[in-house]
Amino acid sequence: MLPLLLASSSPYRRELLARLRQPFTWASPDLDERRLADEPATELVRRLARQKALALAASHPNYLIIGSDQVAVLGEQILGKPHTFERACEQLLECSGQQVTFLTGLALLNSATGHCQVDCVPFTVTLRELDRERVERYVTAEQPLDCAGSFKAEGLGVSLFKSTHGCDATSLIGLPLIRLVDMLHQEGVQIP
């Protein structure tokens, strides 16, 4: 079996991948993650997941390289990482009572053969009605400044949700394990 490499510096993705109990290493790809003009959100995350895996292929021959990228979408608007307290509060208040879809792009590249599987896994959440005080308490407690849409679903972010809908809850955190297991199986990796 080829060794696994996670093309990400995200601690959330590393924690998720560790659930599969397969040894892996990780490295951070260096690439421009800006959206192309008129690029649909689904294509954006698929492209970036693939590019992240490809960015490490030359330095990691004979690996199975996992790339992933995620955006949150409110209507037609892509919600990126807020980076600041105020922007996180603004994003959450915009989403109050609304449905937000998290689109997670996933790529698995066999750097020995060049074979690359790519997919996009959606997961939708409906938010509770939120007021400024609740949002500020959440952002202060959770500090979701590096999370798409300002949601940290693996923590207190779940308290903001009224309901969820999707085939793989791990996609909400940024690495859809159910789909990844399917991809790994196609490369001959058996997960118990």
Image (cartoon, helix red, strand yellow):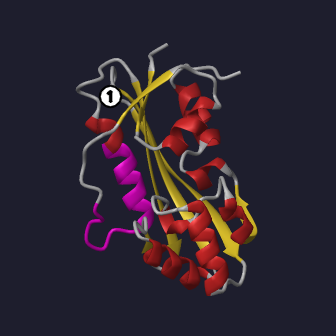
- The verdict on residue 183 being magenta is no
Query: Residue 181, located in which quarter of the rendered image?
Result: top right
- Compared across the picture, whether 180 is left or right of 40 comes to right
Q: Is residue 91 above or below residue 35?
A: below
Residue 135 placed where, x, y %?
A: 62, 77
Q: Is residue 38 above or below residue 153?
A: below
User: For this rendering, which residue is in front, 159 or 115?
Assistant: 159
Magenta residues, start to end: 34-51
Q: Secondary structure at mark 1?
A: loop
Seen at 70% across and 71% down, the residue is: 160
Pick out the residue farthest to the top.
1
Q: Is residue 3 visible?
A: yes
Residue 104 placed where, x, y %?
A: 51, 54
User: For this rendering, which residue is in front, 124 or 79?
Assistant: 79
Pick out the residue farthest to the right.
162
Pointer 1 local density, CA inside 10 Å: few below 14, some 14–19, many at least 20:
few
Q: Main secondary structure of the magenta part?
A: helix
- The verdict on residue 41 being magenta is yes
User: For this rendering, which residue is in front, 180 or 126?
Assistant: 126
Q: In the image, what residue type sits under mark 1?
A: Gly
- The residue carrying mark 1 is 114
Seen at 29% across and 57% down, the residue is: 33
Q: Is residue 99 visible?
A: no
Residue 36 placed where, x, y %?
A: 26, 66
User: For this rendering, which residue is in front, 37 or 143?
Assistant: 143
- Quadrant location, the C terminus: top right
Seen at 59% across and 26% down, the residue is: 185
Seen at 57% across and 34% down, the residue is: 17
